[in-house]
Amino acid sequence: MTAAATAVPLLEARALSFLRADEPVFGPLDFSLGEGELALVEGDNGSGKTTLLRLLAGLLHVGAGELYWRGAPWRREACAGETLLLGHQLGLKGDLSPRENLAIAAGLHGAREGASVAGALDEVGLAGYEDEPVRRLSAGQKKRAALARLLLLPGTLWLLDEPYANLDRAGIALVNRVLERHVDGGGSALVTSHGAVSFHGGEPRRIRMHA
């Protein structure tokens, strides 16, 4: 990618597997990701792409193998403040507005230096919808509200599971733009997608899932 990886990877997996009922969902999997890098997670349906991102977000336990964060054995507590997940469940409260959802998130986790709720919502195209209950928004607008949370909260590693779903061309371009800026600024990302990722700096790295 456009920024070189550090000598010690931000994230490293060695023979990583996830087991369900003692059967492997994926793995063994080996990969590393440095700061300023993006990797596209590829695989057939059911290959464990979503499971991998949920595991890295601390929602699931490592089944087998080793996982490292900044060169030390991975612990959820060590990277919780640096890891942000955007999954199929967007984590937005439907009765609250985008402004209220983001204000609560920032109150819990803090905000990036120079970032604001209003600025994040404006950047994703939700100006004029800031105070509308999320349940009244379209699927694409809800996804934009979740993207605004990524822009607002501090986080080095973004875990994005099909971030282009429910977005039009302008929304897809928005995702690519904020991803590229995140990586150019030294952030990292793992993304599951069906090919919409596009960067001026070239093709992203690829991690192939297999059971």
Image (cartoon, rainbow, N blue to C red):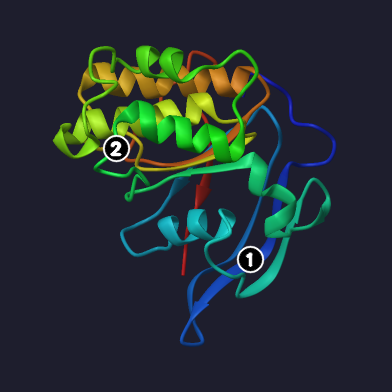
Task: Name the foreground residue: 65 vs 168.
Answer: 168
Res. 5 in view: yes
User: Could you tell me the amino acid type at mark 2?
Assistant: Leu
User: Could you tell me the amino acid type at mark 1?
Assistant: Leu
Left or right of 88 in this view: 188: right
Q: Which mark is residue 96?
A: 2
Q: Please provide percent x and percent y for residue 157.
A: 61, 38
Q: Please provide percent x and percent y for residue 20.
A: 46, 80
Q: Please provide percent x and percent y for residue 28.
A: 60, 68
Q: SS at mark 1?
A: strand
| Quarter of the view holding residue 65 | bottom right
| Quarter of the view holding residue 197 | top left
Task: Name the foreground residue: 156 vs 45.
Answer: 156
Q: Which residue is mark 1?
A: 16
Residue at 52% x, 62% y is 59
Task: Name the foreground residue: 117 vs 16.
Answer: 117
Res. 196 in view: no
Q: Name above or below for residue 89 compared with residue 124.
A: below
